Image (spheres, rainbow, N blue to C red):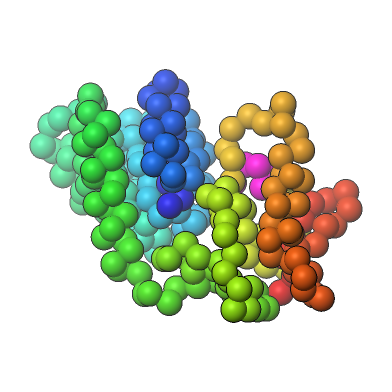
């Protein structure tokens, strides 16, 4: 699943990314409230892990604005505060669960899996993205071109989902890196080109009509 972690304690954020990635989730991280707000309100995540106290905008306000714009992504709120009124404030703005720091990673993982199971049950089984004869099942995490099932890694799936959600729109390498990887890739500046090559080999191979296009000097798009 695609998880957003909004946490200003960088050590904790890095630990959460590593632990959740080991569980085969795709994890984005924001270290302040404003960046977290922009990502959380995009509606592209399966779960948001949200710290209560953040620079720029606090977790309660981020959660409130998510719900105001219709984003129903489950929210697990983290805080060093243990007071009842703080928990109530978070839950009243639309948070689905609450975890007080310090916490055991085993408990966090259990709560994450419970929220993801609840989300999966709440989604329609047929929820899909489709471009031409390419379909992406967001519940089953399955891609198909026609009747052919396409085996994708977690990053390939996240990249294809991002392209399909923005079908017809040219996405720059910077946009793709920011959305799919969310960390410094200066040493791997060609990572987008590599993964686009992987996707083309899996999606467009043996098809007369390629869907993934290169726009020279700009980036990539998937053609509707």
- Residue at left offset 28%, top offset 40%: 109
Residue 47: image x %, image y %?
A: 37, 50
**Magenta stretch, main secondary structure class:** helix
Outermost residue toward the top? 11
The residue lying toward the viewer, choosing from 153 and 168, is: 153
Among the 4 quarters of the image, the one containing residue 18: top left
Please determine whether, in this image, residue 79 is positioned above or below residue 175.
above
Residue 199: image x %, image y %?
A: 69, 56
Please determine whether, in this image, residue 79 is positioned above or below residue 179.
above
- Residue at left offset 22%, top offset 28%: 103
Please determine whether, in this image, residue 67 is positioned above or below residue 101.
below
Residue 189: image x %, image y %?
A: 75, 34
Residue 180 showing in the rendered view: yes
Tell how many labels: 0
- Residue at left offset 59%, top offset 78%: 147
Q: Residue 223 vs residue 97: left or right?
A: right
Please determine whether, in this image, residue 51 is positioned above or below residue 136.
above
Tell me the quadrant of the picture where the C terminus can be found.
Answer: bottom right
- Residue 178 among magenta residues: yes
- Residue at left offset 61%, top offset 73%: 148
Q: Residue 7 vs residue 122: left or right?
A: right
Residue 39: image x %, image y %?
A: 50, 47
Among the 4 quarters of the image, the one containing residue 6: top left
Residue 62 showing in the rendered view: no
- Residue 119 among magenta residues: no
Q: Residue 133 vs residue 218: left or right?
A: left
Give, as a single range, the part of the protein colored magenta: 174-179
């Amino acid at each position: 699943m695609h998880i957003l972690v909004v946490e200003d304690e960088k050590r904790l954020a890095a630990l959460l990314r590593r632990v959740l990635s080991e569980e085969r989730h795709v994890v984005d991280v924001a270290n302040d409230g404003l960046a977290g707000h922009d990502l959380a309100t995009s509606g592209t995540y399966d779960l948001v892990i949200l710290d209560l106290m953040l620079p720029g905008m606090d977790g309660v306000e981020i959660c409130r604005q998510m719900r105001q714009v219709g984003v129903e992504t489950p929210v697990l709120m983290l805080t060093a505060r243990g007071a009842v009124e703080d928990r109530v404030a978070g839950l009243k703005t639309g948070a689905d669960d609450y975890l007080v720091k310090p916490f055991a990673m085993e408990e966090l993982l259990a709560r994450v899996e419970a929220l993801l199971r609840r989300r999966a049950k709440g989604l329609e089984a047929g929820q899909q993205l489709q471009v031409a004869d390419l379909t992406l099942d967001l519940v089953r995490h399955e891609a198909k071109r026609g009747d052919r099932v396409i085996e994708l890694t977690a990053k390939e799936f996240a990249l294809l989902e991002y392209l399909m959600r923005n079908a017809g729109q040219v996405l720059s390498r910077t946009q793709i890196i920011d959305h799919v990887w969310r960390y410094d890739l200066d040493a791997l500046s060609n990572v987008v080109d590599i993964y686009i090559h992987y996707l083309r080999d899996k999606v467009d191979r043996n098809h007369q009509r390629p869907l993934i296009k290169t726009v020279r000097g700009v980036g990539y798009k998937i053609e509707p």
